[in-house]
Image (spheres, rainbow, N blue to C red):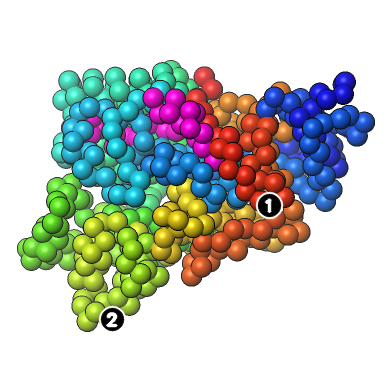
Amino acid sequence: MTDNTYSIIIENGTIIDGSGKAKYKADVGITDGIIKTVGNLQAEKADIRIDAEGLFVCPGFIDSHCHTDIGYAAEFPGVRGKLMQGVTTDVCGLCSTSYAPVGEGHLEEFLKRQSDVLAGIRKSMTVAEYIEETNKRGNSTNIAMFAGNANIRIHGVGYEDRAPSDEEMTKMKELLKSAMEDGAFGLSSGLTYVPSQFASTEELIELCKVIAPFGGMYNSHMRNEGNEVIKSVAEVIEIAEKSGCKGHCSHLKAAGSKNHGKVKECLRLIDEANQRGVDVSFDVYPYTAGSISLSAVLPQWILSQGFGDDFEVLKDLKNIKRIEEDLKREDWENIVLQCGYDKINIGYADNLPQYEGKSISQIAKELNLTELEAMLKVIIDSKAQATIIYYIISEDDLRLLMKSKYCSIGTDAFARDYDGPTAGGKPHPRNFGGIPRFIKKYVLDEKLMSIEEGIYKITGLPAKMFKLPKRGLIKENMTADITIINPLALEDTCTYINPVSKPKGIDYVIIDGKIAADDGIFNDIRAGKALKLDK
């Protein structure tokens, strides 16, 4: 090579290339956002040299499941919480709601029902328009977006609990096909959320026939993660098999102590499906607690009608009595019954700190209310903005799932910052430390798997699963998305009590050949872009 060929040379590091193969010592040369050379570059010159002695040089980490697209990227493109975990690409548009596509059908009601007033969806938008807007302003991470089934269904049917007519189904298919043509990575569903939960298996099969020719994936927050988790995994497999697309189970778990251990049967079903040629995978987040909006704990009948501006529906005594009875039933995804009010903690409550960090049981005791009354009060007072952290997963189940060759790692997090409007309350620590926690706790400390396999699960594997273009490997001619970590200093500093905290040991993050984190210091260069499915 001649002088000044490289913009960056990373030298003296230990390469973990994202393929799962054994680590090795080598230098990496980058030019024009591309990895040009992997080898001995000691005699070559570069504009910038990074000494990675004692450090692991990895492909940029890929978050297999998150919600960066829902407003946060559009409203706060320079946030640090994900990038400082070493994440360079966020797979999002999941659990049925995505920032695009948003069709014109039932648009007014859709916009009115946005659950996140901080950064909600503001208008109708195609995936092509979203990509153009994102790439024009830049983002702290890359975004690979699925088309949300809720968006698709609202466009065609609205919020009604019924099957679509032939005309409505045609509208849904047209919007989904347009999204795939624009570069969406597939279709996501959230089958415990209104209105995605109203979609039948047959309806989802027909929609997935639209994404199959593009090589797209059906990525499902399944219909039930508790008592019927095995049946729900089988549904994902059926949809993938009958439509011809790839299938993926979002944040796979067996929720509730009575269901712990059922993941063994889930894994058996996934393995058998792959053996007969059905491409099915899944992701997990490295915690035993999940997080959703508090209002999602309520039965579907009240969610489908909406709360209105004054929340009178949650104050009506007949509705309260019906909710109380429903929360005693097991035949739906009943989080209250699965884990109890004492294990449902308020994370964020829209600037109501008197609730944040406390369980529903604690709040009820302080206010001298029943637990149901306390829960409804928090929903009303926060205008349905409250989120919860709920403890529901078995550590043994989590470890077993992580070891599967079909498992990648996600955070299920939003894009948040260490200060400002996105740092409010006590959000789940996965927003700031999920990926470092996985590497440190489960790979380096517990040695659940080799470091090469652990890095593969957050680089090469999700890049292959989701068909991310030219990412996931330290290899010549790949995009220069690179994360450099110090294995001796790596530490997830986030806790449930103090979640807004930067991890240690993430030394450098490079996106598209540009240094976004330099010796642990964030650079607000917004080199991330919206990616398109690698067809």
Residue found 48% across the figure and 70% down from its top: 497
Residue 157 in the figure: left or right of residue 215 = left
Residue at (58%, 26%) from the top-left corner? 469
Other residues around mark 1 within 10 Å, as few (<14) / some (14–19) / many (≥20): some
Q: Which residues are magenta?
A: 129-155
Say whether residue 407 is magenta: no
* Element carrying mark 1: loop
Q: Is residue 320 above or below residue 407?
A: below
Name the residue rendered at 78%, 36% in the picture.
Answer: 48
Q: Quadrant of residue 125?
A: top left
Q: Quadrant of residue 405?
A: top right
Relative vertical location of residue 174 with respect to residue 308 in this rendering, above or below: above
Q: Residue 451: which numbered mark, if any?
A: none
Local packing at callout 2 (Cα closer than 10 Å; few below 14, some 14-19, many 20+) is few
Asked if one can make out residue 405 in the rendered structure from this viewpoint, the answer is no
Say which residue appears at 26% left-offset and 27% top-offset. Answer: 103
Question: Closest to the observer: 397 or 231?
Answer: 397
Q: Mark 1 — residue?
A: 520
Q: Amino acid type of disc 1?
A: Gly
